[in-house]
Image (tube, coloured by chain):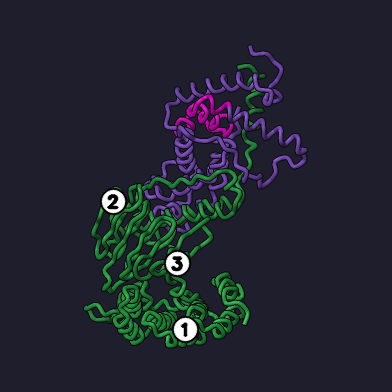
């Protein structure tokens, strides 16, 4: 090869070396994703076998959007964390065809959607890892222990609930669930029947509030964060190893509240009230108490006792002022007053709502009701 | 012909052993130490590609997962590079891979800050054309060429990294050189990088 050609090649090689480097943050994301795939620091535990690394596909435009990048990185981290977990806690993952029905532990699982679901069961039979696809999970209503459904992005913790879990969210059709990140940070303290929760853009968490009166207060998260010793009273907490409860399942407050919701949905007010009473005796947490009292007002409304319902909602609105439960109850009271022809109390309650929660979730409906009621 | 490669430092056997056992702290040390060079290698193999971050991530994850099987016969850096080569090879062979330029890629340290925007844009265009031609030449030849000519690995090292024999590696580099020069001469964007001397 001539010297000229050699020097040409050297110039082209020098050009090839002029590669722009990744931004520091991108390199850091890659390192963190890899570290997340590492086994915990245990001396003799072997690391999992080589797994196919996840592939994230992003268009250049989306790569510019921080949210998209964050989601992709987070998803990859989480997928790797799940892969890591499969090293010990889970059975081998298996692909299940759409429509397949499985009985895994207490859960009746049906693969939903058009694509197969990859499912691994927890060795303790108290949950599954859904690393691909979507499933419907039906848990017995009298279940005493929470059931965990891990996905690539989040964990759904359910007790006696019926849910559909996809890689992007959860839809609750019975009972209530809690949604946590894989680092056990609570993302949604309570997603209830009729509600769905989803992740969009990796950063935005959306609760589709089909049933606003049942939303859990935001302070639930803080309470749970600080209550790591025993969280089984949340309806979605985990059993602790030294759980002193007797072997026979004893319904907890969230179980009873779920039962009350089901009964109320069927119009069985008496049964719902009995369940609420049991829930209130079962040492409920503040958020659960708020829910129980809201449900009691719901019962009165279903039973046709408007005054009792109104005073019940107002009581919740006062006691839980400033919380989502209080907000829900205040709006429910205003709406009930408006619907039952109590125009002046309705206006007062609507005004109170606007004053207390100017940016509230029902601000738009409140305006609509105010217009509907007209001026005094 | 190629840049001399620095002699690798003796390995920290205790650190490597901790990595084999999945010790995160040890892994972090190793990954942080080697990530820039692995990233640079991947970048030079794939060119301006939006999936550089993905490829780096895949490489590091594969390394973490495979560490228990690392026998210590090669340096960690070489071993990581081999993983990177395999990951990149799979990436380049994907049939429906889209050629995309990463808009997010920005030089951390501008290599030639004194260059005018116009010159830099021309350089960027030339870079893209160079990798366009390398892509057309074929994955195996391209990788052998980049590893030897651009990265400075010896023929035997390239053979080890790519899992090919030395003679096959030599052949690939030869044909890639020839094809690349031939293509570059016809490409206006690359002509300025070539001498006026006619081919012998």
Mark 3 and mark 1 lie on one chain; the one further toward the N terminus is 3
Identify which residue, A50 or A276, lies in the foreground.
Answer: A276
Q: Chain of mark 1?
A: A
Same chain letter for marks 1 and 2: yes
Judging by the rendered image, the residue that carries numbered circle 3 is: A210
Q: Position of residue A105 (x, y in %)?
A: 24, 63
Separation of marks 2 and 3 at Cα, in angstroms:
27 Å
What is the display colour for chain A?
green
> Splitting the image into 4 quarters, where does residue A61 fall?
top right
Up/down of B45 relative to A226, above or below: above
Judging by the rendered image, the residue that carries numbered circle 2 is: A99
Identify which residue, A367 or B28, lies in the foreground.
Answer: A367
Q: Which chain is purple?
A: B
Instruction: Identify the secondary structure beneath mark 1.
Output: helix
- The residue shown at (37%, 60%) is A150
- The residue shown at (46%, 88%) is A311
Up/down of A46 relative to A347, above or below: above
Separation of marks 1 and 2 at Cα, in angstroms:
43 Å
Instruction: Identify the secondary structure beneath mark 3.
Output: loop
- Report the mark closest to the observer, 1 or 2: 1
Q: Is residue B168 left or right of residue A367?
A: left
Q: Which residues are magenta?
A: B133-160
What is the chief secondary structure element of the magenta stretch? helix
The answer to whether the residues at label 2 and label 3 have Cβ atoms under 8 Å apart is: no
Can you see residue A95? no
- The residue shown at (37%, 70%) is A176
Identify which residue, A259 or B138, lies in the foreground.
Answer: A259
Judging by the rendered image, the residue that carries numbered circle 1 is: A313
- Report the mark closest to the observer, 2 or 3: 3
Q: Is residue A304 left or right of residue B120?
A: left
């Amino acid at each position: 090869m001539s010297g000229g050609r050699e020097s040409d090649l050297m110039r082209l090689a020098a050009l090839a070396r002029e590669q722009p480097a990744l931004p520091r943050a991108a390199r850091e994301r890659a390192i963190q994703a890899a570290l997340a795939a590492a086994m915990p620091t245990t001396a003799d535990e072997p690391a999992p076998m080589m797994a196919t690394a996840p592939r994230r596909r992003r268009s250049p435009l989306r790569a510019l959007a921080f949210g998209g990048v964050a989601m992709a990185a987070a998803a990859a981290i989480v997928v790797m964390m799940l892969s890591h977990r499969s090293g010990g806690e889970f059975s081998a993952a298996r692909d299940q065809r759409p429509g397949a029905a499985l009985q895994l532990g207490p859960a009746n699982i049906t693969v939903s959607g058009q694509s197969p679901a990859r499912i691994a069961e927890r060795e303790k039979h108290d949950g599954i890892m859904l690393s691909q696809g979507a499933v419907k999970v039906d848990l017995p209503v009298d279940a005493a222990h929470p059931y965990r459904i891990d996905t690539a992005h989040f964990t759904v913790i359910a007790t006696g609930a019926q849910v559909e879990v996809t890689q992007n969210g959860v839809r609750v059709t019975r009972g209530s669930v809690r949604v946590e990140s894989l680092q056990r940070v609570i993302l949604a303290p309570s997603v209830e029947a009729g509600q769905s929760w989803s992740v969009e853009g990796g950063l935005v968490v959306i609760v589709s509030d089909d049933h606003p009166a049942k939303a859990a207060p935001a302070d639930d998260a803080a309470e749970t964060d600080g209550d790591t010793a025993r969280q089984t009273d949340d309806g979605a907490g985990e059993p602790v190893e030294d759980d002193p409860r007797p072997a026979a399942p004893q319904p907890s407050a969230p179980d009873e509240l779920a039962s009350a919701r089901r009964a109320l949905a069927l119009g069985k007010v008496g049964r719902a009230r009995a369940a609420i009473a049991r829930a209130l005796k079962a040492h409920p947490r503040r958020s659960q108490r708020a829910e129980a009292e809201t449900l009691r007002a719901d019962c009165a409304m279903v039973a046709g006792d408007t005054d009792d319902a109104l005073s019940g909602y107002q009581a919740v609105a006062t006691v839980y002022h400033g919380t989502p439960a209080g907000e829900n109850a205040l709006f429910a009271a205003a709406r009930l007053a408006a619907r039952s022809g109590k125009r002046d109390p309705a206006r007062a309650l609507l005004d109170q709502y606007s004053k207390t929660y100017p940016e509230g979730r029902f601000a738009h409906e409140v305006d609509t009701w105010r217009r509907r009621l007209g001026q005094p | 012909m190629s840049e001399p490669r620095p002699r690798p430092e003796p390995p920290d056997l205790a650190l490597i052993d901790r990595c084999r056992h999945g010790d995160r702290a040890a892994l972090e040390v190793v990954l942080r130490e080697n990530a820039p060079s692995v990233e640079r290698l991947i970048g030079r193999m794939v060119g301006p590609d939006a999936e550089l971050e993905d490829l780096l991530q895949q490489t590091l994850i594969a390394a973490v997962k495979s560490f228990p099987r690392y026998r210590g016969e090669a340096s960690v850096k070489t071993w990581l590079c081999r993983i990177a080569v395999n990951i990149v090879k799979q990436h380049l062979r994907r049939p429906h891979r889209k050629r995309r330029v990463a808009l997010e890629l920005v030089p951390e340290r501008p290599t030639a800050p004194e260059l005018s925007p116009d010159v830099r844009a021309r350089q960027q265009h030339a870079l893209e054309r160079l990798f366009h031609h390398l892509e057309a030449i074929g994955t195996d030849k391209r990788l052998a060429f980049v590893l030897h000519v651009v990265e400075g690995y010896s023929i035997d090292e390239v053979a080890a990294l790519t899992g090919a024999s030395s003679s096959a590696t030599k052949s690939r580099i030869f044909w890639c050189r020839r094809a690349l020069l031939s293509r570059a001469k016809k490409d206006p964007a690359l002509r300025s990088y070539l001498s006026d001397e006619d081919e012998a």
